[in-house]
Structures are given as C-alpha cells and as structure tokens.
Image: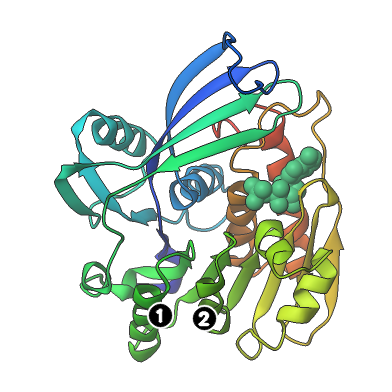
C-alpha cells in the first residue's frame, strides 16, 4: 500500500456518554432540571477519531486517510447506538473485539452550560482490549497508531509487536489519567501526549515543566506535547527545543469542554501525519480545540 493512502488507527475506549446539560453544578441532594439530555458516543479514542475523520474529509490536498477504531464492544442498545454513530461518521470498527453478553461502558456527564465544565462519572465492567485482539491487524494499513494509554501491560505488548514488524507507523501515546502504572508507556511513543491531569499528578506546574521533566522518561528523539486548558499547549521536539501555542478561546464563550484534549490530539495528529512542522501542528490543535469548546459535541468543527 502506498504510504500516502495509509490510515490512522486509534486504540482505546469507545463508550456511551449520557450527557445532561445543567445551568449550574448541583449541590448534593439538590433537585434540579436539565436543559438538555442526549446520548453520544464517547471515550478518548472514539472522540479523537470523530475529529480526525472530519479533518480528513475536508482535506483539500493529498489523500484523505481512512480512520479506524480498535476497542472492545459490548452488546445491547448502548452498543447499537454507538455503532450507528461510528457508521454515520465513517469510522471503521471492523476489528473491534465484541463481548455481546456484556454492556458497553457508560459515562454520565454533567455539562455545566454556564462555564463549559464537564463532570464525568464513568462505569465499566467490559474487559479491556488485549494483545490477542491487536496482533491480527494488518499493520501495513496504517501510518499512524495512537494509543489512548490504558491497560499498560497489553499496550506494551502491542507496541513491541509494531516495532518488531516490517512496518513503521508513527506510534503516539497519551498519558491522561492519574495512574502511576501508565508511566511504563512513556518510553514507547514517538509522539507522547501528556495531559494536564497526568502532569499535575506528578506535581508539575506547567506544560513547559512537564515536557522538560518527561524528556528523560521518553524514548530517544521523541516529540513531547502537553496541552494545558486555557493556557494552550507546549511541545518539545527531538532536539529538546520547546515551542508554544496560546489557546483560542471561543468568541461566544465556553459551551462544552468535554473532549477538548481529544480534539487537540486529533488536530495535532492530522497535521503531523502530513509532515507539518511541530509548532504549526500544536497551533492548529489549539485552534480546533478552541472551536470545539465553543459548541456542544464534536460535529461540524471544520
Ligand atoms: P482535557 O481536559 O480535555 O484533557 P485540556 O483542558 O488540556 O483538555 O485542553 C486541551 C486543549 O483544548 C487546550 O490546549 C486548549 O487549546 C483547548 N482548551 C481547553 N480549555 C480551554 C479554554 N477554557 N479556553 C480555550 N481553549 C481551551
């Protein structure tokens, strides 16, 4: 397969988001009414793909790259709903591992429309993706494989398998959650995304400090990228040089910050896949994430 027709694979979670829009965050035992309620596909990997697939669709020059999700899926109406959304978005899910007698994970989200904050309660008992589910993929199809950064032991085996194959897709990994066991993944990525949440867990106070402190935990010559909410994002290239982008707050105010980080990641991956310089890529990531913060959901961002 020609390099420029290869696609992007995101490995991680798809779940059902059940989103209640409220005009303030409720106090415990308060009884309030939501201004809206909806179901939507969610999960870091699925969110990133929702944006990536739109960026690919509107790409004017060169190939539009296929986008694929690798996740575990359950059965029941939650899964049916999410599959319909994936199909509508043209996100390939053919290789997902299905546990039809189990339920898809759900995230209950309280979206505060007065400031765009999102409070998430996640529930899952679906098995995580295993190396067994990954190893039969045809790696010649991808020029970028992004890992959400969960289930470290299995992820280590997946990345080892990629490195031992005759193919060399770029491997990006996000360390997002406050989980110490994720650290083992830091040294595996060509492009390492570090969230503010994960950085704060290590006690780091800024995106610059995070990139500097993670440099010796990362793979040699890796690119490090750290988004930091309204402060924008910082990246460090293979030589250790830092660059920065301001955030682009939506002119009409914050409406929905759910998945801002996933949107940023998609924007950056889309640009880096095309060889765009790192600084330009993070500026684009901040711009598209800013647009997302100004509207509900992930649609019509381009
Ligand atoms: P998450 O909490 O979803 O992991 P972040 O809060 O780090 O993500 O934000 C990712 C990107 O989204 C930021 O780099 C920024 O560009 C944009 N963003 C997030 N919050 C805001 C905000 N309040 N104003 C403007 N842009 C924002």
Residue 285: % across, % down? 70, 52
Query: Can the viewer see residue 287 in this picture?
Result: no
From the viewer's perspective, is residue 36 above or below residue 288? above
Residue 48 vs residue 302: left or right?
left
The local crowd at label 1, few if under 14, some if 14 to 19, many if 20 or more residues have their Cα within 10 Å, is some
Mark 1 vs mark 2, CA separation in Å: 8 Å
Q: 302 and 248: which one is in front?
A: 248
Its colouring scheme is rainbow
Residue 146: % across, % down? 48, 65
Residue contact between numbered discs 1 and 2, judged by CB atoms under 8 Å: yes
Residue 25 vs residue 203: left or right?
left
Q: Residue at x 40, y 58 (%)?
A: 12
Q: Disc number at residue 184?
A: 2
Residue 15: % across, % down? 38, 42
Q: Which residue is mark 1?
A: 156
Quadrant holding the N terminus = bottom left
Quadrant holding the C terminus = top right
Callout count: 2
Q: Disc number at residue 201?
A: none
Query: Can the viewer see residue 146 in this picture?
Result: yes
- Closest to the camera, between mark 1 and mark 2, is 2
């Amino acid at each position: 397969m020609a390099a420029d027709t290869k696609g992007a694979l995101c490995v991680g979670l798809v779940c059902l988001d059940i989103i209640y829009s409220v005009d303030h965050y409720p106090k415990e035992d308060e009884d309030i009414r939501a201004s809206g309620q909806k179901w939507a596909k969610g999960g870091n990997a699925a969110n990133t793909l929702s944006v990536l697939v739109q960026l690919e669709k509107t790409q004017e020059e060169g190939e539009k790259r296929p986008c694929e999700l690798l996740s575990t899926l359950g059965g029941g109406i939650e899964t049916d709903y999410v599959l319909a959304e994936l199909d509508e978005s043209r996100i390939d899910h053919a290789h997902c591992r299905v546990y039809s007698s189990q339920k898809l994970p759900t995230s209950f989200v309280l979206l505060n429309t007065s400031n765009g904050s999102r409070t998430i309660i996640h529930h899952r008992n679906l098995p995580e993706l295993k190396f067994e589910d990954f190893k039969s993929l045809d790696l010649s199809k991808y020029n970028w494989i992004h890992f959400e950064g969960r289930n470290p032991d299995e992820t280590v085996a997946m990345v080892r398998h990629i490195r031992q194959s005759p193919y060399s897709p770029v491997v990006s990994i996000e360390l997002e959650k406050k989980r110490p066991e994720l650290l083992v993944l830091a040294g595996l990525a060509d492009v390492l995304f570090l969230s503010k949440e994960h950085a704060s867990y290590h006690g780091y106070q800024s995106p610059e400090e995070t990139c500097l402190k993670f440099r010796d935990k990362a793979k040699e010559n890796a690119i490090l990228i750290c988004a930091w909410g309204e402060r924008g994002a910082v990246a460090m290239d293979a030589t250790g040089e830092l660059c920065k982008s301001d955030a682009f707050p939506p002119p009409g105010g914050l409406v929905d910050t759910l998945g801002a980080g996933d949107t940023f990641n998609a924007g950056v991956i889309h640009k880096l896949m095309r060889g765009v310089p790192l600084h330009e890529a993070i500026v684009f990531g901040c711009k598209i994430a800013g647009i997302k913060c100004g509207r509900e959901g992930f649609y019509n961002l381009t």
